[in-house]
Amino acid sequence: MSTTATAPSHGRAPDGPAADAQAPDGHAPEVGARQGHAPERSASEIADLARRVVGTSSLDEASLRRYLHGLPGVDQVGAEGRAGMLATRSIKTTSKAWALDLIIRMIDLTTLEGADTPGKVRGLCAKAVQPEPGDPTCPRVAAVCVYNDLVPVAVDALGDSGVHVAAVATAFPSGRASRHVRLTDTREAVQAGAHEIDMVIDRGAFLSGRYERVFEDVVAVREVCRENGATAHLKVILETGELATYDNVRRASWLAMLAGADFIKTSTGKISPAATLPVTNLMLEAVRDFRRETGVQVGVKPAGGIRTSKDAIKHLVAVKETAGEDWLDPDWYRFGASSLLNDVLQQRQKLRTGWYSGPDYVTVD
Amino acid sequence: MATTPTTSTGTRVDVRKTYKLFIGGAFPRSESGRTYEVTAADGRFLANAALGSRKDARDAVVAARAAQKGWAGATAYNRGQVLYRVAELLEGRRAQFVEEVSAGEGISRGDADDVVSAAVDRWVWYAGWADKVAQVAGSANPVAGPYFNLSVPEPTGVVAVLAPQRSSLLGLVSVLAPVLVTGNTAVLVSSERRPLPAITLSEVLATSDVPKGVVNVLTGRTAEIAPHLAGHLDVNAIDLAGAALADGVTWGALEAEAAGSIKRVRRPALDDAEPDWTAVPDGPRRILAFTETKTVWHPKGV
């Protein structure tokens, strides 16, 4: 892969957590402080960048296929071995305390059930703002992730707490609907006040090689996210559990980033396997390489299957080792999770009191 | 032993055993990777046992917690049947238990045989209580109002059990079985020097109908593991029977730790000796030590 010079129009992402506006007490930034520090890019800038990376004058099926299939293949044994090695690191005491708080700040507290009620979402929002009642040092989570129709409830419940509302849209989780329906779905969520949109790609189109269609879907959804002055961030769910190979995960990651994704996300959480460490590590390599090549930083969000602090800490190790410290920040790395938060809270209690805690000592969600 | 396979030199190589822990129905090594030598009363080597750590105790509590709801949800009759089946399997392993009790406790095979018989009988005795304890300990209370008022004993939850240090099978059964009959799940810390009967019991339980996680067996130093169980917020009760005569353990200190999370604590009977485990219990006291009384008010028809 050639390393092209950074185009002046695309400002480089900040070089480290020091450049970050995170409040010192660990709480999420106040509302209004837009998450993500990458300068806003216009649709034409994104298209220019994609054409330059792909090396073509027009982004069509053939050029995208040529580019994506020209990406180096993934050594499966090597990738799994590397992930296994990263998982052996031991993180203890003060490092562990720091990691636990960072994990909480990175959580997109999620409920995506058919049985979700406004009451359940309000309860989740209360927990998002104050995960550990009685402990003011406990940070807030990054966002609450709900279905489209419950966005107004979440927006209302979170108020000006600084916790964002993320909505899954585009006929989540399958994505099997016309583009019109998927865009309308997204538009409703954005208009209801969602700060972040989690879209799914059309895996059927991707697996049958119609890359241009997937690319244009992402571009179209991104436009809806930025309609009428809205600034919703776009997370693109690749649903890696359905992509069959690591090569496909790498291709889908690059395709989503070229189309202007702010985040690439592993899974919907409805398919197993979801966010495995090798897949997440592969996506971290992709965002690292993408920034090296274009100067544009893209975030990563593993979702589904991360239930314990231990798992989450393994992910943080991978973030640090593969992508770098710039990604060790809620603006660039998120965990899509529900039960993870309770486990982290129990671990925090263990560190604070010295005694193992139990599920009776955290709120039920 | 009629024919023993031999090496070319005529002497058979010993198959020396390295046992593991019993957590959640599986036999994992200690998280710490440590083992210790178990020796007979006369000092000869018997086997290697896993030297459990606080993290093994943590894992065992997680397994016990996960199993508790299902075990308590089974009918009392069913629990009784499942436990009775364990007694059948204990009987089937009689020879192995006699061997281990005899070697570990330094008693003759004849005496050890009596101990095993008593242990099996004790297990059956407690299994029988499963569907009777509510009648004995429950009550229909006369109240001044148009209500049926019923009190019933319910399991307290996850119980940590420190098994007696000396009586490695009969004492073990006498403290473990009463915890299980009402629907508690147990994290058992075996006798430190004489863990083999507890390990064999875990092999029995693994092949019985007792669901995984209902009994979890940790071998190792009582003084190392017990404080973490006593302080663990997700353990509801602790039986300190094995705190007496354990190296470096003061049961009062464990009771003080347990108070931090308002656990039920059963103190050891004596400080410097073990009770006579051969005596048949004079009632379901040990069972009721790990129950909570639930009282229900039900309106009578008008």
Image (tube, coloured by chain):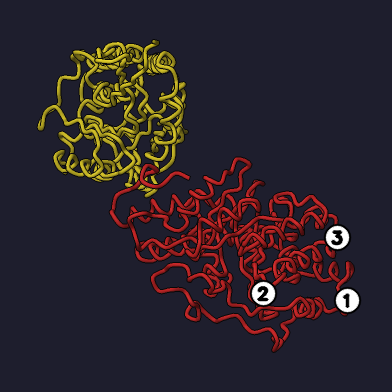
Task: State the SS at label 3.
Answer: loop
Instruction: Answer with mark 2 or mark 3, whichever residue precedes in sequence.
Output: 3
User: Alpha carbon of mark 2 to alpha carbon of mark 3: how far?
Assistant: 24 Å
Compared to residue B1, the image places residue B199 above or below, namely: below
**Residue A272 place in picture, x, y as percent:** 65, 46
Amino acid beneath label 3? Arg
Which numbered marker is on residue A210?
3
Q: In percent of the image, x 47 and y 24: which residue is there?
A: B207
Q: Which residue was labeled with disc 1?
A: A58
* Chain of the residue under label 1: A
Q: In percent of the image, x 47 and y 68: which residue is there?
A: A28
* Chain of the residue under label 2: A
Amino acid beneath label 1? Ser
User: Do callouts 3 and 1 mark residues in contact (Cβ within 8 Å)?
Assistant: no
Compared to residue A186, the image places residue B203 above or below, namely: above
Task: Tell me if I can see residue A165 in this picture.
Answer: yes
Q: Are the residues under marks 3 and 1 on the same chain? A: yes
Of the residues tagged 2 and 3, which is closer to the observer?
Answer: 3
Locate residue A145 relative to residue B200 in the image: left or right.
right
Which chain is painted in yellow?
B
**Residue B104 place in picture, x, y as percent:** 25, 28
Task: State the SS at label 1.
Answer: loop
* Chain of the residue under label 3: A
Which numbered marker is on residue A289?
2
Amino acid beneath label 2? Asp
Q: In percent of the image, x 62 and y 78: which residue is there?
A: A38
User: Alpha carbon of mark 3 to alpha carbon of mark 1: how far?
Assistant: 16 Å
Q: Residues within 10 Å of mark 1 (few under 14, many from 20)?
A: some
